[in-house]
Every structure is written in structure tokens, then in C-alpha cells.
């Protein structure tokens, strides 16, 4: 049975690691990797393959930089050629990025069954490219693997047949559980001259936060407010970096005395930094889940989340009004002695990828 696993971006690489390992331990499964090249730099791609001990991809589509439409077109043409050559039984796609939808569509058009890992998540906001990618990918998929109960309900509401949907837990947390101790052995915070709980980590890169000058100025104001209370460590995503330059705002950020700007970090360094932080400020999907598991207070700079379990069981709080008062309160509370949080979400237990492998094999027949 041949399965082609598609990856294109940083979070995809992390989620692939436990899946690839689980598939490799199944003798009946021949598992190949296709990298679209959506993220293709050393810091956003290569370092993840190295740290996660993933083999080099069997194919790299080397798609050109461009907007989502151009990249989708490029992927459709190039991935179709790979599919014609390989004729896999299944194509597995992960998450909600351009590569996810484009490869699901190319596979479905060839009559190849699609597996979607991290299916069913919905923010309710179709202005977000990720939300459109999620809905359309789910509609094209034969097997849909869900991380939290809300995902099952969303798919049911959209009329997806129940037998296709499997609540299996979270492969991102599989990776976290596996790599946590390795990350703890690194001296990441010592190298940065930091001590535990003395700083806040910030990651922001969603288009609605960084793509216009107004929204990016709001983000800088938020960071400045936080930095009055705590040192802010900000590993800047390439998209955010490009827009800081485009709008001439880099100097303003660099001039903030208690803010440290870094490039994108490797997975293990980021885990180390996150685990020792007083709090995290983010608009990342994965970071909301990781902080829930690690019980690190997380402030999500968005009006909604497609991961509601991080609000009900976890440490996550949404913030859509960036009032200084509410931010100050959050930072002060997060620095208090550790609040007791509820237990970790069900099935976030490090075994999700193995469940997925078994279910795919059973469906293959
Ligand atoms: N991450 C990383 N280095 C960084 C920032 C984040 O390795 O400098 C990891 C983080 O642990 C999480 C993933 O990247 O697992 C999240 O990726 P991103 O925010 O790009 O995507 P999203 O989760 O929003 O789809």
C-alpha cells in the first residue's frame, strides 16, 4: 500500500515526523514524502528535517514564491506529474496551508483517495485563507482525522459522512511529547541570557495581523505594552519581517529597549524557549495547542480560534481588543504562581499517529 505524504510549511514538517515514524513501522505501508517547497529556507524547512530525523523528501516540487493562486496553480501542475508516475493509493495532506488544498485537489482529480490530518477545525471566518483551505480540503477527503470533539461536530454539520471521520488526537502533541526532553537539554535560554519565567515569547504572522500597515502598527503597540512589564523575545516569521521592511516599521521595533528580535527558531530551540516562558503571545494555531499541553498561559491575538478546546480546557485566551489594561492584567496574572488548569485534552497522549496508521490500513482493506 503506497501513501504519499505532502508537506510544504514549517508546521507540516513537525506534524509529519510522528506520522512518518508510525507509517515506517507498518510493514505493509510504503510511505513517501513530497515537499512542495512552499517554505524552502534553511530556517523554515531544512532545520526541521534535520532535528526531526526526517529523510530527504522523495520529491521537491520547488514551487515559486508567489500568492496563493499562483502557488496553487504551480502545485497542481507539478504534483499531477508526480501522481502520474507514482500512482499512490493514498495522498495524505496536513493542516490548512496552500499546499494542503492544492495537493488534495490534484489527488482527488486523479481519483486518488485523500487523507486529511487535522480535519474539521473551523474558526467561522472565511476571510482567513486557512479557513477556506480547511473547508475545501475536508470536502475532498476520504479519511478525516480530527484533533478535538468540535472538529467532529463541524464535519457532521457540513454533511461529511460519519464513517470517514475519526477523532484520533493531535500529531503536533505526539511530536511535542517525543521531543520535549531533547529540547530541555539545550541551553537555549542560557545562550540568550534569560532565566526561566522572566520573559514572554511572541510569534505573529497571520495575514490579518501583519499584512496591512494599520494592523502591524497595532501589533507593535501590543509588543511595546508587554515589554514594559516583561522582556519580549520575538522570533520573527519571514512574512512579518518582509512587512516590517515594507511599511518601514523595523526601526520602531528595534528601538524598543526590552524587546529582543530573533530570526525564526529551530523546533527544539523554540520548544525550550516556550516551555520556560512566563507566557506566550501568538496568532499561531499550533502554538495555541502546544501551550495548552504545556500549561503555559497563551494570549492569542485573534477574534476567534478554530481550536476551541484550547480555551475550554487549556491556557488560551483570545484578545481582539488590544487594550493596554487587559494586556497588563494578563501578563501580571501569568507571572503569578502557577494557576491550576484542567487536564490535557483527551487523546493528546503521544499515540495519535499510530492510531492514524492503523485506521488507514483498515480502510485500505
Ligand atoms: N515554531 C518553531 N520556531 C519558531 C516559531 C514556531 O519551530 O520560531 C514551531 C512551533 O513550535 C509550532 C509551529 O512552529 O509547532 C507553528 O508554526 P506556525 O506558527 O508557522 O504555523 P501554524 O501553527 O499557525 O499553522
Image (cartoon, rainbow, N blue to C red):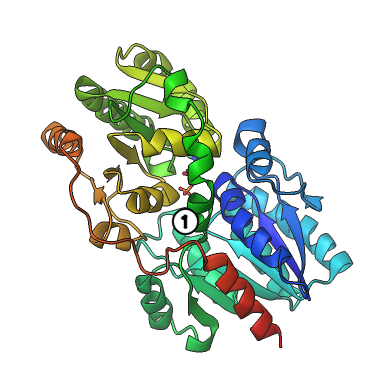
Q: Nearer the viewer, residue 144 or 131?
A: 144
Sort mark 1 into few (<14), some (14-19) or many (20+) by Cα contacts within 10 Å: many
In the rendered image, residue 250, in percent from the top left (x then y), is placed at: 42, 18
Which of the 4 quarters of the picture holds residue 124?
bottom left
Q: Secondary structure at mark 1?
A: helix
Residue under the image location 68 percent in, 46 percent down: 53
27 w.r.t. 187: above or below = below
Residue under the image location 40 percent in, 55 percent down: 127
Q: Left of 5 or right of it: where is 133?
A: left
Which of the 4 quarters of the picture holds residue 19?
bottom right
In the rendered image, residue 30, in percent from the top left (x then y), is placed at: 79, 68
Q: Left of 180 or right of it: where is 320?
A: left
Residue under label 1, please give it.
Answer: 173
Which of the 4 quarters of the picture holds residue 197?
top left
231 w.r.t. 108: above or below = above
Classify the position of the C terminus by image quarter. bottom right
* Residue at mark 1: C-beta within 8 A of ligand 1: no
Q: Nearer the viewer, residue 56 or 342?
A: 342
In the rendered image, residue 131, in percent from the top left (x then y), is placed at: 45, 60
In the rendered image, residue 207, in percent from the top left (x then y), is placed at: 44, 42
346 w.r.t. 127: above or below = below
Residue under the image location 12 percent in, 36 percent down: 329
Residue under the image location 16 percent in, 39 percent down: 337
Could one spot residue 345 in this view of the protein? Answer: yes
221 w.r.t. 125: above or below = above
Could one spot residue 308 in this view of the protein? Answer: no
Classify the position of the N terminus by image quarter. bottom right
Amino acid at each position: 500500500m503506497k501513501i504519499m505524504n505532502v508537506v510544504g510549511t514549517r508546521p507540516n514538517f513537525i506534524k509529519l515526523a510522528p506520522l512518518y515514524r508510525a507509517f515506517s513501522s507498518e510493514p505493509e505501508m510504503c510511505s513517501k514524502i513530497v515537499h512542495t517547497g512552499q517554505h524552502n529556507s534553511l530556517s523554515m524547512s531544512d532545520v526541521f528535517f534535520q532535528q526531526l530525523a526526517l529523510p530527504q523528501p522523495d520529491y521537491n516540487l520547488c514551487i515559486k514564491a508567489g500568492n496563493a493562486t499562483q502557488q496553487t496553480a504551480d502545485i497542481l501542475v507539478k504534483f499531477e506529474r508526480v501522481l502520474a508516475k507514482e500512482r499512490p493509493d493514498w495522498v495524505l495532506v496536513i493542516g490548512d496551508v496552500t499546499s494542503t488544498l492544492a495537493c488534495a485537489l490534484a489527488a482527488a482529480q486523479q481519483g486518488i483517495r485523500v487523507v486529511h490530518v487535522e480535519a474539521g477545525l473551523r474558526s467561522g471566518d472565511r476571510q482567513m485563507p486557512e479557513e477556506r483551505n480547511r473547508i475545501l480540503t475536508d470536502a475532498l477527503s476520504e479519511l478525516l482525522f480530527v484533533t478535538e470533539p468540535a472538529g467532529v461536530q463541524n464535519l457532521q454539520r457540513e454533511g461529511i459522512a460519519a464513517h470517514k471521520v475519526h477523532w484520533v488526537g493531535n500529531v503536533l502533541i505526539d511530536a511535542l511529547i517525543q521531543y520535549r526532553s531533547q529540547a530541555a537539554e539545550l541551553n537555549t535560554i542560557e545562550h540568550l541570557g534569560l532565566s526561566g519565567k522572566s520573559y514572554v515569547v511572541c510569534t505573529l504572522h497571520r495575514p490579518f495581523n501583519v499584512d496591512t500597515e494599520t494592523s502591524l502598527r497595532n501589533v507593535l503597540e501590543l509588543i511595546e505594552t508587554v515589554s514594559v512589564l516583561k522582556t519580549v523575545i520575538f522570533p520573527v516569521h519571514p512574512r512579518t519581517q518582509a512587512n516590517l521592511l515594507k511599511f518601514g516599521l523595523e526601526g520602531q521595533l528595534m528601538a524598543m529597549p526590552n524587546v529582543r528580535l530573533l530570526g525564526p527558531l529551530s523546533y527544539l530551540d523554540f520548544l525550550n524557549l516556550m516551555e520556560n516562558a512566563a507566557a506566550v503571545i501568538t496568532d499561531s494555531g499550533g502554538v495555541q495547542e502546544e501551550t495548552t499541553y504545556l500549561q503555559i498561559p497563551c494570549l492569542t491575538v485573534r477574534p476567534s480560534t478554530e481550536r476551541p478546546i484550547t480555551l475550554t480546557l487549556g491556557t488560551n485566551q483570545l484578545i481582539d481588543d488590544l487594550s493596554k489594561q487587559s494586556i497588563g492584567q494578563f501578563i501580571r496574572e501569568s507571572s503569578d504562581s502557577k494557576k491550576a488548569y484542567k487536564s490535557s485534552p483527551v487523546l493528546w497522549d503521544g499515540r495519535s499517529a499510530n492510531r492514524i496508521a492503523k485506521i488507514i490500513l483498515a480502510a485500505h482493506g
